[in-house]
Structures are given as structure tokens and as C-alpha cells.
Amino acid sequence: MMASLQKELVAQLKKGEALDLRADGKAGSGLVMTLQVFAEAVSLEGTYQVQEWPFFSSARKGANVRGFMRVGKGPLFMTCQVESPHVALLFTEKTGEEIDFASGVSKGIFVLNTAYHAIEAAQKFRLRGEVFTVSGDRLGQEYLHHPIPNISVLAALHKALPLVSVQQVVQALKHNGEKRRLPLKAIQANQDCLLASLKEVSSAVVQGEEAWEHPLPSFAGYEGYPIGAQSALRSSLQNLTANYARTGRRLVFQDPQDRCTGCSLCIVNCPEGIIQFVPDEKRGIRVTGADVNHFCKLCRECIEACPLDLFEEVEGALV
Amino acid sequence: MSEKRLAPFMEMAQKESCFRPGSTLCVDCMESIAFQNVGRATDNGIKTIYTMGTFCGEVSTLLWPTVVAWGRGDQEATQFEKSFSIIHNVFESASTVAEGIRDTADILLELGALKKPIQVVANSGDGGALVIGLRSLLHTIHRRSRVTVVVLINEFFANTGFQYAVTATPYSETSTTPPGDFIPGNLEEPMNHVGLALMAGAEFVAQVSPAFPKDFTEACERALSCSETAVIFVPSPCIAGWKFKEGRTIELAKLASETGLFPTFLKEKGKAGSLRHVSLDSKQRTPILRFLAPQRRFHHLVHEKNGEPAVVKGREKEVALIQDWANRNVQTLQRLTAWDVA
């Protein structure tokens, strides 16, 4: 049973108007592959033409990245980036907390990778329209032994925008895997993950009295910054890289019995230099914790380095 | 080199690094760890000027307005030693720009415009320093300019998408040497960068990873106190290109030394060098498989099954050849510890 908005969009496509998609996620979350496979499946089907391109430059693993896709019946002349998409995808929840992934969409289709049900997710991210969610991290861990949500989001996207058959998506996925020189086992695991994810997509039509605005980001220029703004930025410590870490996980330091020997291995092995310590008469220094809430990317180096296992990765949100 | 007492390792850990948190480098990036520790070593009461060639460590730490991870901008200008300068330029010019700064600073010091001496550190990647800019690196060393050059080696052009660089391990996968049925990855043997730097006449050459903090600290201190060019090669496992699980960077850096691919090497002109963290007896050395197995760029050669490495059927020959290369590499470096430019 197709919901009304889906019908509306498909009808719009048939009339010849283009359909815009935008995906937000982290580098390493498989965003590019998902859009590539979906674009390939649509072009295999043959009715529509597609444009697909990722949008990032020097982004590194864990940084926020964005990808775009455009589908249309006729030739696609528009080549600018998508500001107000019809379909907005979210690959990692942390990205959604950092930026407004629905910006420019007042009512549309939303595809999210989250453990929440569609209705709860709509409440959390203030969405109006049709919401599709899938627990991609869990499914990725189960089938691909790595919490990567790309295949599950592909399944949810297929449910949200039924332009092609499942077979075509599977075919495109297989071809993409071969192109990326994935081993046969991994290609098969991807396919299994896709078929399993299709069964786990939850969806809801969310309508509400109040309209939630998702305004377009505005750019006011650099006038606000005085000369020497670089210096101010350096000391402002604005770039909170704690959002690079996996959603729902955090680092803790526990040393209730005061076992820290002050060996300093965690301090010199921390890529961010955020291990906090105090001088100690006997040991030289004593580690007291880390600035987890602002800068910890959860690289696990301190966990591996500490000979006494005082650091630990646990479930829990940042404070 | 002066006869200064080397700072104990724990003392070093307490120093303030000019490399602040908030860079956009990958989760678990070795370059980040190296910068933290180089930053601590340069916090020695002398003003430091850094130069950067283009590489991951430049584009991810000097992005404006998102982040400028190289800090100390908040220090008062009167705090000469604590305030801090950085110049970035194109790929090959980290060492040559550093040379220019050194000359200018020396002239200003002589004229009295500059009250205190400075130290110059050039950072660049292996693509920048050893492929595109080998010429400028060797010429800087040849001119005996008093700068410290830090070269981060991750075996390819990671910044532009993991293309082959001259330091790549034999039979590794890079985006320009993809392994297939007929060609098992990169067929070239790596260049002997340590030997080249020594032969060009560097006063101090080290190949050391921050995974061995004591040796890294020692190398940084000795390099900064040199009166001619000092070069530190830093083998940096690259999580995105080598494709391994998070939390294994330090472990892989240690294995790279222990297996003989990047042995820890320190050599000062006129003195006997040392080769550390590698067994000189090839029978007792850590087998190369331990290093290859966790990385997916060697997936066509070795798999990791239940934590144990297993060679892919039909690829025994390639693995044996990598092992052979590692053995020869240790022999070469061992000879270099006793070799001096005439």
C-alpha cells in the first residue's frame, strides 16, 4: 500500500519533473556506495535518467559528508547541489544531531539509520511526511561484522522510493561490489544484509498540526570576524570532533582503586592529546580522565595502550 | 650535538603540545599521534616555525574556518617562545621553505632584529617529500641547512586517494596498483630513503614511530639539537588506506618495526648508529604474516582467521618474497648503522 506522498512523487516523476535526493552521514558510513548502487539500479531499469555525486573534499574518516542524487524522466540539465530535496537520508544519528539533515524540507520522505521506530525518530528529528527507519548499525554488525549502515539504508531507500524491483537493486549491488573488487564472500554478505534489512524497515506517515520549519542555512559572510580571526578560532576550540565517534558509544576512565602508575602511555598515544592528568609526588603524574565530551573520536588507542585496562568503551551518549 | 641530558620520557609527556585537539584527521590516525609528540618535543623554550608541504596532515589541520588545529594563537605575542608560526606551501617545498626561513632568521639574528634563535621544523608526507619532492629534500640535506625535516610515511598518496608511492610495500594494494588474477598488486620494491638521506649528508637520520615513545622522544630531541639537517622518517599506519580495525594503529606500527619493514633506526654522523626493535637474526624475527594479516590491503595474500594469519592458496610465493625483502631491508639498514659519508 503506497502512501499518498510517495504516489505524488512518482506521479510527478512520470510527468517529467525531476526528483532530488540528499544524503548526510559520516565519511566511512558507506554513503557513496548506497547512492551509487541506487543510481545504478534506476538506470538499469531504464525509464529514468540519474545524476549521482558525493560532495566532500578533504573530509576524513568520521567527518560529516554529503551526497546528492537526481532522478528524472528527460535529460537532466540542472547540475547544482540539492538545497531542498524531496527525499532526505541520514546515515548516522550523530550527524543529525550536529546539523539539520532535513534543512529545506518542510514535508517529504525521510530515510534514517536509527534504532528508533519511525514515529519516535520523527519526534526526535522534528519531521513531517513519510519516515522510514532501519537499524543499520545492528544489521551491519550482524551480517558484515562491522557497524556500517550502507546496505540497510539502501533497503530503506528502496522501500521509500519504489522505482525499481528488488532484483534490480540486488543486481546493481553485486555489480558495484565487483567493481570495488570485494571478495565474493563480502558480496554475498551484502546481498543477505539487503534482503534481511528489507524486512526490518519501519515506516510511518507523520502528520501534525504544527509545522516544523527546517530553514535553509544562511551565510552572512565573514564580516563578523575581526582581523586575526584565525587566532581567535584556534583558541575557541570550536571544532568538537567528539561527533566523529560511533553513535551511542563513549569512552570512560575508571580508576576507583587509584591503580594508575603514571606510565604516560595513554598520554603519548592519544591522537587528540586530551588525556587529563595531575602531578603526583610518588608516580610523577596520575591520569584523571579524558575530555571525552568535546574531542574524543573513540579511536580506542588508550584502551589498547593502558597496561591496566583503566579505559573502556561503553554504551552511552555524550553529556 | 650538545651534551645535553635527554629529557626523561615522563617529563616529555607532561609538556604542552602545540597540536591541539579538533583536527579533521581520521579517527585513529598515526599522523595525529606524531604531531602531538613532535609538538611536545618542540615545547623546549625555543620559538618554533613549522613549514608544511601538502599532505593529509596539512589539509586536515589547517582548514578554515572550520578548524585550525595547530594552536597557540591565544598566546600573547610577548611570549615569544610559546607563540607559534606556520607556513604551508605545495607538496615538495616543505624542506626548501624551511631552509629559506632558517637563512632569514639567521640574518635577522645577526642584524639584531631577532633577539633569540628559532628552530625550524618541516613536515611533509612521503608522497610530498620522497616522490614529488625528493629533489628538494636531498638538496636541503646537501646544503647542510639547519632544519629538522619530519617525513610521515604511509606508503602512498593518502590525501588524493591512495595512489602508489615509492615507499609502498611489495605486493600491496594501492588504487593505481590494484591486485588481480595476473598481477598481485604493487610489483616495485621500496626505495631506500634512509640510505639516500644518509648519503646526501644528513647529520642525523632516524626512522622511528611514536609507537616507541622513548625512541621517538630521543630522536626528536637529538634532531632539534643538530647543527645541520636532521631527518626523521615516521612510519605512519593509515587506517583508511591500510584498512584495519580501529585501535590497532600502534600495534601495527610496532609490528612494522619488529618484522623488519620499517625497523627503528637512529644514526648520527660520525657515530655508530643503532637498529632497534627488530631481531637481527632472521629466524627470531617476527614473521611478516603478523603484520600483513590485519590489513585489508593485503587481503589478496593473507587473511586473518580467529586472530591467526592464514596465507591465501597460491600466494605463498608473494608472501615469501615480501619476507625476503624485509630480511634484506634489515641487512641494508644494519650495514648503514656503520656507514658514514666521507
Image (tube, helix red, strand yellow):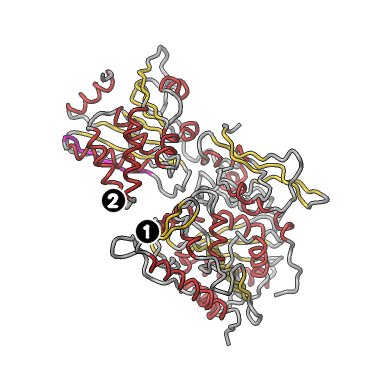
Q: Nearer the viewer, residue A294 or B273?
A: B273
Q: Position of residue A255 (x, y in %)?
A: 72, 40
**10 Å neighbourhood of mark 1: few (<14), some, or many (≥20)?**
many
For mark 1, what is the residue?
B300
Asked if the stretch drawn in magenta spans residue A49, the answer is: yes
Q: Does label 1 lie on the same chain as label 2?
A: no
Measure how far apart labels 2 and 1 are at the Cα level: 16 Å
Tag 1: amino acid? His
Q: Is residue B133 left or right of residue A14?
A: right
Tag 2: amino acid? Lys
Q: Position of residue A317 (x, y in %)?
A: 57, 32
Q: Which chain hosts label 2?
A: A
Residue at 29% over, 61% down: B181
| Mark in the foreground, 2 or 1 | 1
Q: Is residue B35 above or below residue A161?
A: below
Residue at 73% over, 47% down: A260
Give the dominant element type of the magenta stretch: helix, strand or loop.
Answer: strand
Residue at 53% over, 66% down: B259
Residue stretch rendered in magenta on the structure: A47-55
Q: Position of residue B326 (x, y in %)?
A: 49, 71
Quadrant where the C terminus of chain B is found in the figure: bottom right
Q: Is residue A233 above or below residue B91?
A: above
Using the image, tell me which numbered label, if any, was put on residue A179: 2
Q: Position of residue B245 (x, y in %)?
A: 49, 49
**10 Å neighbourhood of mark 2: few (<14), some, or many (≥20)?**
few
Q: Which chain hosts label 1?
A: B
Question: Can the viewer see residue B100?
Answer: yes
